[in-house]
């Protein structure tokens, strides 16, 4: 039986990201859908403090700014997401 390295801790996923990142992003997306823009941005920024290169957080920030009509800001966040994850079909679109 092979050993693929240490098992993820209860606080981190297989990629080593803090599990809290996913909770923050889920809440940020819900807040975005409710039009609570500032709170949504705050949650994304908190997720980025825990996982600075998170393409999911960067892409969600792009969505938030796009929804608000701030297209220059949206493009900047989408580009950062693509830089972090160039093979992402969603971000490429």
Image: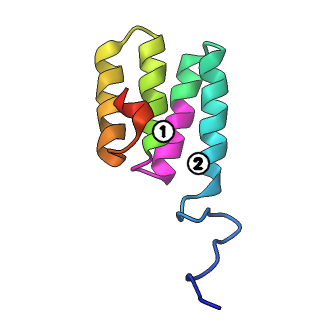
Colouring scheme, one of rainbow, by chain, secondary structure, one colour: rainbow
User: Given the current orientation, which residue lies at the most extreme right position?
Assistant: 10
| Quarter placement of the N terminus | bottom right
The spot of residue 72 in percent (x, y) is 28, 17
SS type, badge 2 = helix
Compared across the picture, whether 11 is left or right of 41 comes to right
Image quarter hosting the C terminus: top left
Q: Name the residue under label 2.
A: 21
Residues packed near mark 2 inside 10 Å, few (<14), some (14 to 19) or many (20 plus): many
Confirm whether the magenta stretch covers residue 43.
Answer: yes
Q: Left or right? Give the position of 9 relative to 66.
A: right
- Callouts 2 and 1 close, C-beta under 8 Å: yes
Q: Which of marks 2 and 1 is nearer the N terminus?
A: 2
The structure residue drawn at horizontal position 66% and vertical position 14%, both measured from the top left corner, is 34
Q: Name the residue at 33% across, 14% down.
A: 71
On the image, the x and y values in percent for residue 18 come to 59, 58
Q: Find residue 44 and report its horizontal and vertical position in percent.
A: 52, 36
Q: Write down the region rendered in magenta.
A: 42-54
Q: Does residue 41 sit above or below 7 in this rendering?
A: above
Separation of marks 2 and 1 at Cα, in angstroms? 9 Å
**Residue denoted by label 1:** 57
Asked if residue 58 is positioned above or below residue 84 in the image, the reply reads above
Return the residue found at the far bottom: 1
């Amino acid at each position: 039986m092979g050993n693929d390295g240490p098992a993820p801790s209860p606080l981190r996923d297989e990629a080593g990201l803090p599990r809290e990142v996913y909770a923050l992003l889920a809440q940020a997306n819900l807040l975005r859908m409710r039009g609570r823009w500032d709170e949504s941005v705050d949650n994304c920024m908190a997720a980025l403090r825990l996982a600075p290169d998170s393409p999911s957080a960067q892409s969600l920030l792009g969505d938030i700014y796009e929804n608000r009509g701030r297209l220059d800001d949206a493009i900047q966040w989408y580009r950062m997401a693509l830089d972090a994850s160039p093979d992402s079909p969603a971000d490429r679109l």
